[in-house]
Image (cartoon, rainbow, N blue to C red):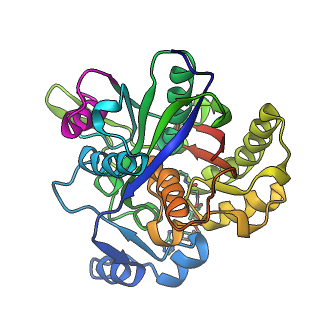
Amino acid sequence: MTHRYSRIVGTGSVLPPRIVTNEQLVAELGSRGIDTSDQWIVERTGIRQRHLADEGVTSSRLAAEAGRRALAAAQLGPTDLDLIIVATSTPDFVFPSTACLVQKELGAPGGAAFDVQAVCTGFVYAFAVADSMIRGGLAHRALVVGAEVFSRILDWNDRGTCVLFGDGAGAVVLAGADQPGVLAAKLHADGRHESILRTAGNVCHGEITGHPYLTMDGQAVFKLAVSVLDSVARETLDAAGLSIEAVDWMIPHQANVRILNATARRLGIPMSKVIVTVDEHANTSAASIPLALDRAVRDGRIRAGQHVLMEGVGGGFTWGAALVRF
Ligand code: UT7
């Protein structure tokens, strides 16, 4: 049976247990001659700490654990799934996909499994693809995960980037439904800006080619992020026929609290309606939105019937939004 809609029936997330506070990071970097401060990091980003994965902990392992927790919340088992999509820019391997490794780890063989690469917009992209596949009859129950070990691609000698990111994973189970659910989603990219945020490396003939670390023009990303998060929110609400006042909770990608403040101000949404986790999690790229979503579902802020607007923005340059009724 093909369903007219899909809806979120469970959420889950996981953070590596190792917390590194700004003070700890500043001391560690300082011992290697890299000058930064808790004050700079807090004032410019709002970040106070990040969770970092121990060596050997992979995106697939974090994704599988977040997936297990989302399945438990949905009161479903792995064999109820017929689709797994993992959004990640830090996959375990070149191939197979991290989604196939998650499928193996969960013990859910047979359904489709693939990765989506849209960097920090990855979760919104994956979510919109899963919704479309369910409404198109290609799947009935999907696990959509954002999972990252960004610490592995950070240059710990570059103070302009290494203080900004963290590791973690978040997941939702999306199931076919007769009532919405997902009300609208909009996805965009502008590849002309590919060079402002990237990890421009690869493996070739047995060697690493290009640059194996993340590089970013922070100011260029900042300006683009604020403008597209405003426009895509309005576009998505228009598509659903809803006004900004109808938004109960906004969950933007958690890159920088100043971006969240500016976006909320431009949209006329009070910060009391914005879910903020960047202070605790830092920027976890594709994992940041589902981590924040799961936090707000579990602490009781997001309740049945409410409208939640999720917004991603990041490398590519990519951006997108999804509006959901819980
Ligand atoms: O997830 C994908 C999306 N990513 C983002 O959204 C990130 C967007 N960009 C940003 O969040 C901000 O641009 C940053 C937080 C990355 C940087 O903040 P900024 O206010 O744009 O600072 P800036 O790059 O203009 O740098 C200002 C100063 C520079 O020094 P000078 O040239 O003024 O002497 C930097 O060298 O801050 C210096 N700086 C630092 N100082 C202490 C850069 N990083 C650090 C640091 N500690 N960690």
- Give the image location of residue 188, x and y in percent: 64, 31
The picture quadrant where one finds residue 36 is: bottom left
Indicate which quadrant contains ligand 1.
bottom right
Q: Residue at x 76, y 48 (%)?
A: 230
Q: Is residue 105 magenta?
A: yes
Question: Up-down: is 214 above or below 77?
Answer: below
Q: Is residue 171 left or right of residue 266?
A: left
Q: Is residue 77 left or right of residue 251?
A: left
Question: Up-down: is 306 above or below 200?
Answer: below
Residue 215 appears in view: no
The picture quadrant where one finds residue 124 is: top right
Q: Residue at x 41, y 51 (%)?
A: 73
In this rendering, the count of numbered labels is 0
- Give the image location of residue 323, x and y in percent: 68, 41
Residue 83 appears in view: yes
Name the foreground residue: 210 vs 258. 258
Q: Is residue 231 left or right of residue 39?
A: right
Q: Residue at x 52, y 68 (%)?
A: 299
Name the foreground residue: 164 vs 14. 14
Question: Up-down: is 229 above or below 271?
Answer: above
Q: Residue at x 86, y 45 (%)?
A: 243
Q: Which residues are magenta?
A: 94-112
- Give the image location of residue 37, x and y in percent: 46, 82
The picture quadrant where one finds residue 159 is: bottom left
Q: Is residue 190 magenta?
A: no
- Give the image location of residue 261, x and y in percent: 71, 65
